[in-house]
Amino acid sequence: MEKITNKEIIDVVKFSDDKLIFVQRNPMSDPTQFKADYYIINFSTGVREVVTKKAYLLKKFGAAHEKICETISDFIKCQAMILKDKSVLVVFPNGQIGLFDGEGNLMWNKELSYNNSPVFSLAEDEDAFWCVCKDENSVMRYSTDNFTVDIRIGSKEAQTFAQPIFLSADEKYVYVCCGNRVRRIDKQSLIVDDINDYYPNLNRFYRFKDVSIICCSDGLYFDN
């Protein structure tokens, strides 16, 4: 693996087919505060450059990012999905979910839960999105038509997904972070298997083309 930075990564947003934006946390003297630094990196060449916060917000929330960020108090912690009609779905780590129209107006917000436990994280899947429920060892897919569950994998008693904390997706798979390993779901067959790697202190995992992006507590790594 190639280490890109030794700072904690608090968000990653796809910029193009061969570039991504990552947000790096820089602690301040007050331990309750931090400064966010924004970078764009070409994961084919490894070239990294500073990018503006505006460019990050535009990629994450779309054209109505300024209006949306007037409503959202923490635009980094949430995950977002721009739907086909240009509305924007936003999911927070505490299970709160909101839908903004194409102009950035909040249409509705509610809480996602399963057996009274929060459902969070967000991975796109055409007209659906995947989330995790850590307390219930479960991963579920929601339809963007009615925001109800159409697929659920795992259970509190099963170890298919042991306390999942994050997921992402590419064209073929959904990748689920469980402890120090990554499990993946084939979107077509729904077969679950493992990525054959061990990642200590894993926080996030993404796959772009043939490159794995691994976010651990000690920094950001690329792997082929």
Image: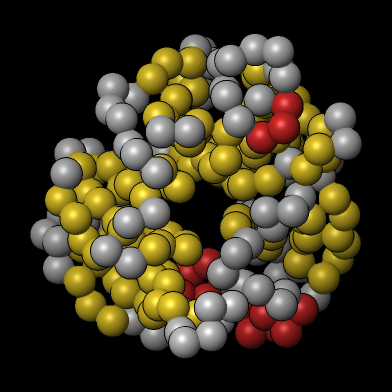
- Which quarter of the picture shows residue 219? bottom left
Residue 122 is situated, as x and y percent measured from the top left of the image, at 60, 46
On screen, residue 71 versus residue 214, left or right, reads right
Count of numbered tags: 0
On screen, residue 160 versus residue 199, left or right, reads right
In the rendered view, tell whether residue 184 sits above or below residue 62: above
> Which residue is at the front of the view, 200 or 127?
200
Does the rendering let one see residue 55? no
Type of colouring: secondary structure
Residue, x 57% and y 24% (percent of image)?
Answer: 162
Residue 24 is situated, as x and y percent measured from the top left of the image, at 39, 71
Residue, x 47% and y 62% (percent of image)?
Answer: 11
> Which residue is at the front of the view, 26 or 4?
26
In the rendered view, tell whether residue 26 sits above or below residue 81: below
* Image quadrant containing the N terminus: top left
On screen, residue 197 versus residue 36, left or right, reads left
In the rendered view, tell whether residue 164 sits above or below residue 61: above
In the rendered view, tell whether residue 103 sits above or below residue 186: below
Residue 101 is situated, as x and y percent measured from the top left of the image, at 76, 68
Residue 217 is situated, as x and y percent measured from the top left of the image, at 39, 54
Residue, x 72% and y 19% (percent of image)?
Answer: 156
Residue, x 47% and y 87% (percent of image)?
Answer: 29
* Image quadrant containing the C terminus: top left
Does the rendering let one see residue 110? yes
> Which residue is at the front of the view, 223 or 62?
223
- Which quarter of the picture shows residue 132? top right
